[in-house]
Image (spheres, rainbow, N blue to C red):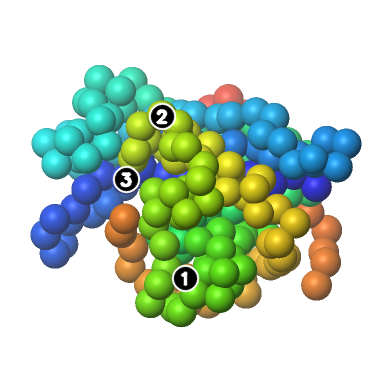
C-alpha cells in the first residue's frame, strides 16, 4: 500500500464571484519499508490557470508563485496525467490536510471533464489528527500548529505545495500507528457535488487500466 500525501495551491479569491484555480500540485509518497513508514519520493508541478490566466498580486504574495512560474506550465489535464503516472500502479490512499484541497480538485476536474476515478481512498489527515487527540470539531488544527504540537520542525516555505505536502507527510509518518485509513470512492461523497471551495468495502483499484480513457490521445484524434 502506498500513501500519497498531496497539497494544492490555488489562486487567491477575495471577492464573491472570483474563481479559485489550482496553480500548483505537490505530493509526497510514503511507503512502509521494513515496518517503518518512510517518505520515498516527492512530486511537484505548476499548473497554468485558464479562467483567469493572470495571477493577482494577492496570489503571488500569498503563495510566492509568480506569473513566470505558471505561464509555461501544463494545463490541469496534463498535470493530473503526470501526477497519476507518478502515483504508480500500486493500491494507494490519497491524503490531504483538511477538506478543501479535495473539494477543489474534484470541482475543477469535473468542470474541465477530467476523469475523477483515480480520486479514491481519500483521507483527511487534519480530521484524523483531531480524532486521535480527541479534539472537538471546532478545534481543527492548522498544519503549522499541528507540527508544533508534535514537535516536528517545518521544512521549506509555507503555502508551497510540495513543502506543505512533505510536512503533512511527516505528521502521517509520526502518527502512522495511531491512524485508521479508510477506503472510499468519490461517488460515496455526495456533498462534494454542491460545496463551493476555497480556503486556507474493498474494491478493485486499477488507476492505469482506465487512464487511456481518461486522457484521450490527441495524436489519434487528429488523424483524418
Q: Earlier in the sequence, mark 3 or mark 1?
A: 3
Compared to residue 22, the image places residue 113 above or below, namely below
Residue 5: mark in rendering: none
Q: Which residue is mark 1?
A: 192
Q: Position of residue 74 (x, y in %)?
A: 42, 28
Contact flag, marks 2 and 3 (Cβ < 8 Å) = no
Q: Is residue 189 visible?
A: no
Q: Classify 10 Å Cα crowding around label 2: few (below 14), some (14-19), many (20 and above).
A: few
> Residue shown at 75%/42% (left/top)?
37
Q: Nearer the viewer, mark 2 or mark 3?
A: 2
Mark 1, Cα crowd under 10 Å, few <14 / some 14-19 / many 20+, is some
Look at discs 3 and 1 and give the one toward the viewer: 3
The CA distance from mark 2 to mark 3 is 18 Å
Q: Secondary structure at mark 1?
A: helix
- Residue 4 on image: x %, y %: 64, 44
Query: Disc 3 and disc 1: Cα gap in Å?
Result: 18 Å
Q: Earlier in the sequence, mark 1 or mark 2?
A: 2
* The disc label shown at residue 156, or none: 2
Return the residue at label 3.
Answer: 10
Q: Nearer the viewer, residue 150 or 138?
A: 150
Which secondary structure lies at badge 2?
A: loop
- Residue at 17% across, 35% down: 61
Amino acid at each position: 500500500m502506498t500513501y500519497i500525501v498531496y497539497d494544492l495551491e490555488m489562486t487567491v479569491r477575495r471577492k464573491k464571484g472570483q474563481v479559485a484555480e489550482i496553480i500548483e500540485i505537490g505530493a509526497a509518497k510514503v511507503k512502509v519499508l521494513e515496518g517503518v513508514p518512510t517518505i520515498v519520493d516527492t512530486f511537484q508541478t505548476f499548473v497554468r490557470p485558464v479562467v483567469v490566466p493572470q495571477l493577482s498580486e494577492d496570489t503571488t504574495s500569498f503563495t510566492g508563485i509568480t506569473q513566470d512560474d505558471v505561464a509555461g506550465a501544463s494545463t490541469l489535464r496534463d498535470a493530473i496525467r503526470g501526477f497519476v503516472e507518478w502515483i504508480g500502479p500500486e493500491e494507494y490512499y490519497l491524503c490531504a490536510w483538511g477538506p478543501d484541497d479535495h473539494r477543489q480538485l474534484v470541482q475543477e476536474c469535473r468542470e474541465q471533464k477530467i476523469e475523477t476515478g483515480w480520486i479514491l481512498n481519500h483521507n483527511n489527515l487534519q480530521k484524523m489528527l483531531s480524532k486521535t487527540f480527541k479534539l472537538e470539531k471546532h478545534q481543527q488544527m492548522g498544519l503549522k500548529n499541528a507540527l508544533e504540537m508534535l514537535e516536528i520542525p517545518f521544512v521549506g516555505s509555507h503555502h508551497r505545495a510540495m513543502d506543505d505536502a512533505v510536512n503533512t507527510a511527516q505528521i502521517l509518518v509520526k502518527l502512522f500507528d495511531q491512524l485508521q485509513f479508510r477506503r472510499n470512492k468519490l461517488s460515496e461523497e455526495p456533498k462534494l457535488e454542491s460545496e463551493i471551495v476555497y480556503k486556507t468495502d474493498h474494491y478493485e483499484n486499477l488507476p492505469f487500466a482506465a487512464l487511456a480513457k481518461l486522457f484521450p490521445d490527441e495524436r489519434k484524434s487528429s488523424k483524418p
